[in-house]
Structure formats: C-alpha cells, structure tokens
Image: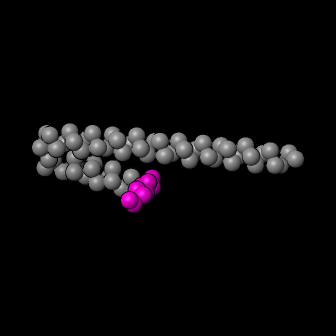
Amino acid sequence: MAVKKERTIEETLKDLEELVKKLESGESSLEESFEYYEAGMKLVKSCNDKIDKVEKKIIVLEENGEEHELS
C-alpha cells in the first residue's frame, strides 16, 4: 500500500486557483459551481491548517533560539 504524500501549500494554492478559474469562466452549471465552491473551501481550510503548522514551528524555533542565546 502506497503512502499518500501530503500536498504542499503551493500545490494546494494552485488547485484553488484552477477552481477559481472554472468558477469565473461562467461555463459551469449551478451544481458544478457549488461543487467547485465546496472543494475550494476545503482547499482554503487545508491551506490555513498548513500555514498554522508552519507558524507554530517558527514560534518554537524562535523560542528555542532565544533560550540558546541566553545560555
């Protein structure tokens, strides 16, 4: 069984950009537009979660850096 690789923030943003293009084209049915919107909102949440993880890692690194400087 293959391990599913987590998508990067950049890959997720690219997917989101593609969905926005589909929505802006005006060529989608109402049902398709809703599906694109729903998928887009999931991608936005995924990006926010990934960014939060990165921010937390940065905070930990900064705190660890300050501790080493004081020693």
Range shown magenta: 1-10
Q: Nearer the viewer, residue 49 or 5?
A: 5
Return the x and y of residue 33 as percentages of the image width and height.
19, 42
Q: Is residue 48 covered in magenta?
A: no
What residue is rendered at 62% in x and 46% in y? 57
Q: Identify the residue at horizontal 25%, vertical 52% (top origin).
A: 21
User: Is 26 on the left-hand or right-hand side of 50?
Assistant: left
Secondary structure mostly seen in magenta is: loop
- Left or right: where 25 falls relative to 50: left
Residue placed furthest toward the bottom: 2
Q: Is residue 13 left or right of residue 63?
A: left
Q: Identify the residue at image location x=24%, y=44%.
A: 36
Q: What residue is rendered at 20% in x and 39% in y?
A: 34
Q: In the rendered image, is residue 54 in sight?
A: yes
Image quadrant containing the N terminus: bottom left
The answer to which image quadrant residue 44 occupies is top left
Q: Is residue 10 visible?
A: no
Q: How many marks can you see?
A: 0
The residue closer to the viewer here, 36 or 6, is 6
Give percent across and percent down for residue 23.
22, 46
State the image quarter where residue 35 is shown.
top left
Colouring style: one colour
**Magenta residue check for 8:** yes
Please identify the residue farthest to the right as the structure is shown. Answer: 71
